[in-house]
Image (tube, rainbow, N blue to C red):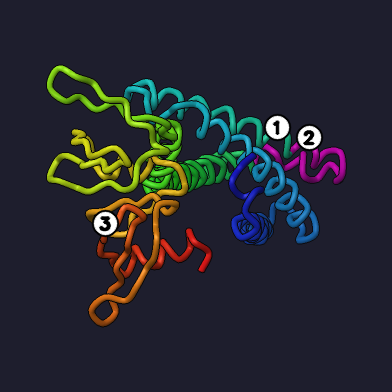
Amino acid sequence: MAFFIKNKRNLIGYLAAWIMYAVLHAISIYSTDLLPLGLSFVDASVHAVVFAEIGVILYNVIQYGNYEKMLQPQKFINYGALALLSVSLWIILGYTIDYIIADDKIIAQFARILPFYILTGFMIYLILILYFRNNILQSKSADIAENINNEPIQQQNETLIQQNENLEILERIAVKSGQKIHVVLVSEILYLQAEGDYVYIFTIAGKYLKEQTMKYFENNLPTHFARVHRSYIVNIEAISRIERYEKQNQLLTLKNGHQLKISTTGYKLLKQKLKL
């Protein structure tokens, strides 16, 4: 459907333009003494309505005809053929309707008025083509801009979906130590400590050094683990107590006696986990 049918503002503008054309058409015909005033307005109204309908068809032909991708000679031929067809159809349909609803005076003056219609028809066609092409280009530019604006959001959504698909809740962690491989059960972990590009895993039985990031463990450990500091992830089931330490800082004591500092953000997260 053409843009002036979908958009109320464009529709009003399109109809207003054809009403103005009908008035100018009637005045031009009447001023030449070819037709009386009443028949001049009848003839002008009929031809305005007919070309307005042809305009709807023209818009869709231009929009979906891929005219902009054609070579210049082919484009010139196609636009020329479209002009001849549009103007011929306008004149034939317009006079057919005139003949049905009006008297023979309009038909009698057909030969004298024909040059006026041919010139007017081609001028209207040219104006419509220029207007429609400009509108179509603007619509395509707006669509491209909208797609560009939406692309980061779509990429973010795709990234989040991919991240969620890659998440796995850990039950055990394999740690290589020399020629040995230790399998650490997550349920036995007390806390994890960042050590450069490695992570120390503290368990009931001892500690292990794992080449992995804290972010990985933060995302993949069960919900009873909380990152209480940029350097520590704690099993909240292993916490013995939390107490104030140096002004607004907090100190966390584990059941094995180890004490860890808690950041402000970590303390808020820990309170949420413990429902305090």
Residue at mark 2 to residue at mark 3: CA–CA distance: 99 Å
Give residue 250's quadrant in the image: bottom left
Residue placed most toward the observer, 45 or 220: 220
| Tag in front: 2 or 3 | 3
Q: Which-is-in-front pick, marks 1 and 3?
A: 3
Q: In the visual, does 268 lie left or right of 193?
A: right
Nearer the observer, 58 or 180: 180
> The N terminus lies in which quarter of the figure?
top right
Is 168 inside the magenta-drawn segment? no
Residue identifier under label 3: 258
Give the spatial CA distance, label 1 vs label 2.
Answer: 6 Å
The amino acid type of the residue labelled 3 equals: His
Mark 2 lies on residue: 96
Amino acid type of disc 1?
Ile
Q: Give how far across and how far down residue 269 sits, in percent.
A: 41, 62
Count neighbours of disc 2 (C-alpha within 10 A) and say few if under 14, some if 14 to 19, many if 20 or more.
Answer: some
Residue 264 falls in image quadrant:
bottom left
Label 1 with label 2: CB-CB less than 8 Å? yes
Range drawn in magenta = 95-112
Q: Main secondary structure of the magenta part?
A: helix
In the figure, residue 165 lies in which quadrant?
top left
Q: Position of residue 32 (x, y in %)?
A: 63, 56
Q: Which residue is mark 1?
A: 92
Mark 1 neighbour density, 10 Å: few (under 14) some (14–19) many (20 or more) = few
Depth check: 124 or 107 in front? 124
